[in-house]
Image (cartoon, grey):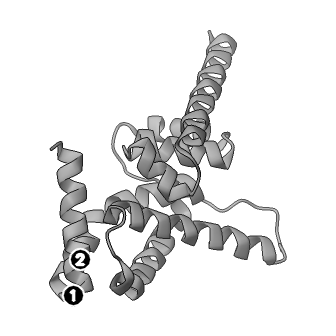
Amino acid sequence: MSRSEDANARLTELALQARRGDPHAMESFIRESQHDVWRFIAHLAGPHLADDLAQETFLRAFRSVRRFNARSSARTWLLTIARRVVVDQIRYERSRPRTTHATPATEPTSPDTGFENVVELNLLLSDLDPERREALVLTQVLGLPYAEAAHVTGCPIGTIRSRVARARDQLLATQTHQDEETG
């Protein structure tokens, strides 16, 4: 069993224990999955919303853990909830009248030396179609197998593969274009 499979199995076991009412299991489940949930949300909705939307994700998971039946891994189940939270946020924002055209400020993700790379990656990802970005983040950033990414998004595996391939092609084309302009 790979390290990723071990982590998925552990999260699933923690979710099942939480389902049976173990509060310590739910606490461990949240602690062990919060980084992946935050990163997934940050890539879909932006780092400025990630904390709030991650919290909402865990609130929904807490409320629905009694219905978790391990048909998929707990990680897949949780990322599906996170995706729904992001979609709900987008719908909410679209339904509200805009009072300004200013874009929200983002907070730096970390003060480390790779900050410029993080900014560049976020800029490149922001140019992708949301469905392609989601597929790429799930499979390449979070490392989900294509089957799990398909389950999270509710589309066929072939669609995920296609979206990832097109996202890669678009990122390569953008990078090549930028290199030609600067080089």
Q: How crowded is mark 1: few (under 14 residues within 10 Å), some or many (20 or more)?
A: few
Amino acid at pointer 1: Arg
SS type, badge 1: loop
SS type, badge 2: helix
Find the residue positioned furthest to the bottom.
Answer: 21
In the displayed structure, 92 sits above or below 75; it is: below
Q: Which of 50 and 119 is in front in this view?
A: 50
Does residue 176 show up?
Answer: yes
Q: Where is residue 89 in the image (x, y as percent from the top left)?
A: 64, 72
Q: How crowded is mark 2: few (under 14 residues within 10 Å), some or many (20 or more)?
A: many
Q: Position of residue 15 (x, y in %)?
A: 26, 75
Q: In which quarter of the image is the C terminus?
A: top right
Q: Nearer the viewer, residue 94 or 144?
A: 144
Q: Quadrant of the N terminus?
A: top left
- Tell me if 43 is positioned left or right of 35 in this view: right
- Numbered marks: total: 2
Q: Residue at x 68, y 17 (%)?
A: 177
Q: Name the residue under label 1.
A: 20
Amino acid at pointer 2: Leu
- Tell me if 36 is positioned left or right of 156 in this view: left
Q: Position of residue 72 (x, y in %)?
A: 36, 62
Determine whether label 1 and label 2 are within 8 Å by CB.
yes
Q: Which residue is drawn at 66% across and 40% down?
A: 128
Q: Name the residue under label 2.
A: 16
Does residue 119 show up?
Answer: no
Q: Which residue is drawn at 56% across and 38% down?
A: 158
In the displayed structure, 121 sits above or below 109; it is: above
